[in-house]
Image (tube, rainbow, N blue to C red):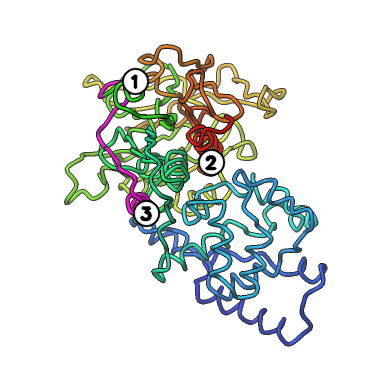
Amino acid sequence: MSHPTRTQLEQAAQAQLDALKAGQEPLKPRERLALPAQEMPTRDPIARRKSMQEVALGYTEAQVRLEARRCLQCRNAPCVQGCPVRIEIPAFIQAISDGNDAEAIAIIRRASLLPAVCGRVCPQESQCQLPCTVGKSLKDVGKAVMIGRLERYVADLERESGALATPAVKSPTGKRVAVIGSGPAGITVAADVRREGHEVVMFEAFHKPGGVLMYGIPEFRLPKAIVQQEIETLRAMGVRIETNFVVGRTRKLLDLLEKDGFDAAFIGSGAGLPNFMNIPGENLVGVFSANEYLTRANLMRAYDKGRAETPIYPSRRVAVLGGGNVAMDSARMAVRLGAEEVHLIYRRTEAEMPARVEEVGHAKEEGVIFHMLENAKRVVGDEYGRVTGLECLCYELGAPDKSGRPRPVEIAGSEFMREVDTVIVAIGNSSNPLIRQTTAGLETDKRGNIVVDADGQTSIPGVYAGGDIVLGAATVILAMGEGRRAAAAINRRLAGGTL
């Protein structure tokens, strides 16, 4: 199948725009519904197998104007209800349609601090685009208005033109807030609290800030320069960032409040403890959690073998266990690190995979081999303790489980061996227990996630939490929504208002 170039997609969109201009505007709803959803230009699949450059190239100007015209401007705006931070979506899309990109990004930034990030990695198809009237009218969420791609376009335009401004900060209040973790939730809280004039210190366990945006999401999906720019914006606002600072080890959480003079704290430390299969052989050399594999490659740039000091395991045949976005990231990273074969093993069918359809498509284009209705039973090794194979089982789908998806049921006697030298386990994460183990009185649930009230406050007054440490592994935009809620409560508390 031929891979359309960015120029070809631009020309096709421009031809349609020219045809629209020759007719009558504004368009009627049925005319808007007849406009095709614009395809995202991407790098050639064969070329990108050996490249860390971003795969999705972004809409062209003609594409973005045409895609914006597909919006019906619904009065009830169901897309806004699907957005965790409640961006005024019809308003910013109308501004794009009118050619006013500066107004569009200004509208977005009233609710979202990370539009260039969210436009790239958030699952819009299960959030703002899911209730889109266009998609519902066409009976296909894949044909909804491409809200995330429009958001990315104006965010990139703002950044590339040098128009990105530092948010205004009010006069100093003398109040101090500790933000633990520098991922999406922490970034949101730090910015919203600092805007009110409070002093903010952000504590990050790793040597670089950015959280999951830096260590979890690969360069080819989210360029690190974009994350770095958002961090620099925080610094320009006066946020102080302390790296290599592990709260619970370097300093206990309560010490920050009781001894170091902080008036409030926000815990946004994420869900960084990897889950494993608990099968024989998981301790063999060549078995990795997706967290370790991606952190070595992303944060420590192990893919840059000529210059990076961090080694990464050389692999020829890789098996990735899981079906979410992290599994796709791991499989696609293994391709780029030189594996001859990458096998993705998932115990349900593709229809039940939680990964984004776009990411699944990109993985297939890049040569990842998908094995549905299979799962690992044990990892096999040689006399030196190194992985040589994976014993797998076949499955069939049974009745729905608690998630609403069909339950995978083992087929007795279906065991078989697959020859691999590397196994990457990507079946989710849990919260790191360090903070809860070192903080008396901090209530957590049975999964180890911190329990919060409607304002994001924990069982300890003045201590708030949000993001994956509360929700479990979630999305960037959901973490931002949690952070925004907690920041508002912190600001009310420090202003002496109701909590």
| Of the pair 61 and 265, the residue shown nearer to us | 265
Q: Which residue is found at the position 43% from the left and 52% from the top?
A: 221
Q: Are marks 1 and 3 in contact (CB under 8 Å)?
A: no
Q: Quadrant of residue 404?
A: top right
- The three-letter code of the residue at mark 1 reads Glu
Marks 2/3 in contact by CB < 8 Å: the verdict is no
Image vertical order of residue 66 relative to residue 79, above or below: below
- Left of 475 or right of it: where is 246? left
Residue at the (77%, 76%) spot, across then down: 26
**Above or below, comparing residue 268 to residue 86 in the picture:** above
Q: Disc 3 marks which amino acid?
A: Thr
SS for tag 3? helix
Q: Nearer the viewer, residue 442 or 389?
A: 442
- Identify the residue under disc 2: 484
> Who is closer to the viewer here, 83 or 362?
83
Is residue 371 visible to the viewer in this orientation of the structure?
no
Label drawn at residue 258? 1
Whether residues under marks 2 and 1 lie with C-beta atoms below 8 angstroms apart, the answer is: no
**Label 1 secondary element:** helix
The magenta span reads: 228-250
Residue labelled with disc 3? 233
